[in-house]
Image (cartoon, rainbow, N blue to C red):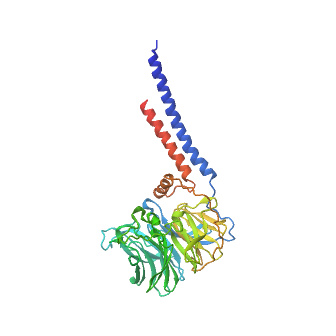
Amino acid sequence: MVASSDISDIRTKLAATSLSTLLIIGGIILFVGTLTVSAAVAPSIGQTTTADEQPRTLVGSQGGGPGWHEYGSVYLLNGTTTTWREGSADSYFDVTKTAKGTVLAGFMHSGYSSCGPYESPCTRTGFRVIDPQPEPTVVSEYSFPVRTSKNSEVHDVEPLQSGEYLLTDMEYERIFTVRDDEVTWQWNASSFYGAPADPTTTDWLHINDVDVIDENRYLVSIRNANQLLVIERGEGVVRVINEDTSDSNDANCQKSGQLADYDNDGEVRCGDPDVLNHQHNPQWLGNGAVLVADSDNDRAVELHRTDNGNWEPAWTLERAGGVAFSWPRDADRLPNGNTLITDTLNQRLVEVNESGTVVWSVQTERIPYEADRLPAGESVGAPRYTADESAGSGPASDVPVLSLMLVGLRALVPSTPFWFREPQLGLTVLSVAMLFGGAVLRIRE
């Protein structure tokens, strides 16, 4: 005869077994179903749609891997087909086709033995000159050693009519010119912003772009301050786009140990993050208009100067082809009036018209940094958009905690599919919790 207590124990074990099995099976079904359904219904982002011809697009790819500093390359697309590629650096950044047919590319690479004040082997950054014909070859290099491979790169280089090369420098936070490997002029950000004692020890301003407006004026992107500066040689800063008007913005610029009140004057120069938020690669469209990849706002934005001197969004684009942008880092207004956008974390390049309709797009193999449409490249002065309202925009999909987790996931795993967003991450976390809970119950049986 079976005691009632034994029957009760059996029922308890059966219940536990049933619950653990249900949790494990349910977790597997939820995980597989989430990925399968999301991939099946996701829009295509790598197909030419309405373009009349196969455009040529020069791409600088940061690469991928840990810290994103592996597999960097510069390559040329004919339509969506890669015609040549140079991949000898850990990372490449801004690319520019010269009148001689060569390509200038900002780069970062490790393994050097000539290291100045740092131990060998070390990382160096600077720019390379690449000759694509007959086989892509690095024909010359200007570089200098940096303390670390993170947040110390030369992101941009531009040729000047004087024969000099104009560079950004995130290691010492400056822009400067070189000729024959000698520095001929420089502007140090410490002349305008309160500076740390040694800018090489922190990601302070992250100066990530410089463009030539005219012979002596340059447009500079100060990423960590949410600002663009116009700097004139011999004069310094002559214009600030997205000026600091409120202390309420300071927290946005002080995150992750970036800006601080280093000079103890009570001021932190931080622009309004609703206007620009840790931007990349602005393009000077002409007096009173600039196009910017507004990276942390996940959009492309065209700013116009108002009658009172402020700069405000006149046109924004937050999605294209049914896909929300994810940390775009370049936006170029093309001579035909369309806009070419480098959608970094979605690993795509996309060309849209003023209404936001996709006319061309391609999925990139790894993380793209910047793209130029040839033969014009990124021009100074280009058609402006006159729309007073956003094109292709929609409600923000940010979800507290999940959005932050998604950013971290994409940083660690750059190959994360573009369609894997906050809903998919939430369901994945739930499925993992179910599997873990089921496994714990099974162990305790």
- Return the x and y of residue 380 as percentages of the image width and height: 57, 80
Q: Is residue 318 visible?
A: yes
Image vertical order of residue 181 relative to residue 247, above or below: below
Asked whether 437 or 314 is in front, the reply is 314
Image vertical order of residue 237 relative to residue 422, above or below: below
- Return the x and y of residue 215 as percentages of the image width and height: 51, 86
In the picture as drawn, the residue positioned furthest to the top comes out as 1
Disc count in the image?
0
Quadrant that contains the C terminus: top left
In the picture as drawn, the residue positioned furthest to the bottom comes out as 162
Q: Which residue is drawn at the image coordinates 42% and 64% (left, top)?
A: 254
Q: Which residue is drawn at the image coordinates 52% and 50% (left, top)?
A: 425
- Return the x and y of residue 286 as percentages of the image width and height: 58, 80
Asked whether 118 or 19 is in front, the reply is 19
- Return the x and y of residue 21 as percentages of the image width and height: 51, 33
Asked whether 220 or 179 is in front, the reply is 220
Q: Is residue 88 visible?
A: no
Q: Which residue is drawn at the image coordinates 52% and 55% (left, top)?
A: 416
Is residue 358 toward the left or the right of residue 211 in the image? right
Asked whether 267 or 327 is in front, the reply is 267
